[in-house]
Image: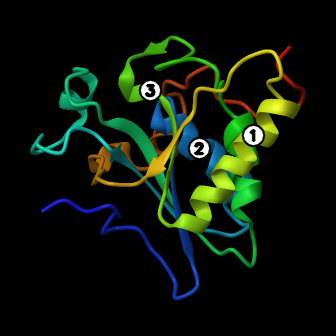
Amino acid sequence: MTTSVSSALKTTPTSSLITLAAGCFWGVEKVFRRYFGNQGIIDIKVGYANGVPTVGNVNYEKVCSGSTDFVESIQISYEPSQVTLEKLLDTFFRMHDPTTVNAQGPDVGTQYRSAIMTHDEKAQKIAWDVKEKMQTEWYPNHKIVTIIEPIKIWYDAEEYHQEYLKKNPGGYECPSHFLRTKPKV
């Protein structure tokens, strides 16, 4: 049975969800924990999203093979009264290069594409609005290629991937994962 939400993700009665892909999920998770860990994030899980529905037993090796079309992603449970989706997406667009197709830094493949996977129509509209704003203000000379679509399928990544860089402080970090302070020219 497939699901669109991590069964391990902590939520509250008032929390909202968003699923984001911006390259290697280790670095994406680290950035969001660093900037929002005490500011509205309830929980984050890393996993694989929106690939070929008939692929079974999705795991890291299969996803890295490039044959599944699953994307390395993070699923965030957040408290909208403490942090807005707009703020999360502003950080998303500035913490990676959303103008590169199927790549972030040295990481290349469909599993590294830039994507926002929404859990409801309201989030879908916000995602398109923020993308348009970021295109104009931050990437005026470079087309944002971020895919915006509803979340369809989610598989939790293996346990050793969860909070990987916290457990392995010297582990690999994609050099494209940092919070940009000025527009790409």
Q: Are marks 2 and 1 in contact (CB under 8 Å)?
A: no
Mark before the other along the chain sequence, 1 or 3 = 3
Residue 7, percent across and down? 30, 69
In the foreground, 119 or 45:
119
Mark 2 vs 1, N-terminal side? 2
Q: Secondary structure at mark 2?
A: helix
Give the number of the disc on residue 24: none
The tally of labels here is: 3
Q: Which residue is tagged 3? A: 112
Q: In the rendered image, which quarter is residue 112 located in?
A: top left
Which residue position is annotated with label 2?
30
Q: Is residue 82 left or right of residue 31?
A: right
Q: Amino acid at mark 3?
A: Tyr
Disc number for residue 132: 1
Indicate which label's residue lies in the foreground, 2 or 1. Answer: 1
Horizontal and vertical percent position of residue 99 = 64, 21
What residue is shown at x 35% (from left), y 64% (from top)? 5
Amino acid type at circle 1 is Glu
Q: Is residue 42 left or right of residue 6?
A: right
Task: Tell me if 166 is positioned left or right of 60 in this view.
Answer: right
Residue 114 left/right relative to 129: left
Alpha carbons under labels 2 and 1: distance apart = 26 Å
Q: What is the spatial separation of the Cα atoms under label 3 and label 2, in whole angstroms?
A: 16 Å
Q: Secondary structure at mark 1?
A: helix
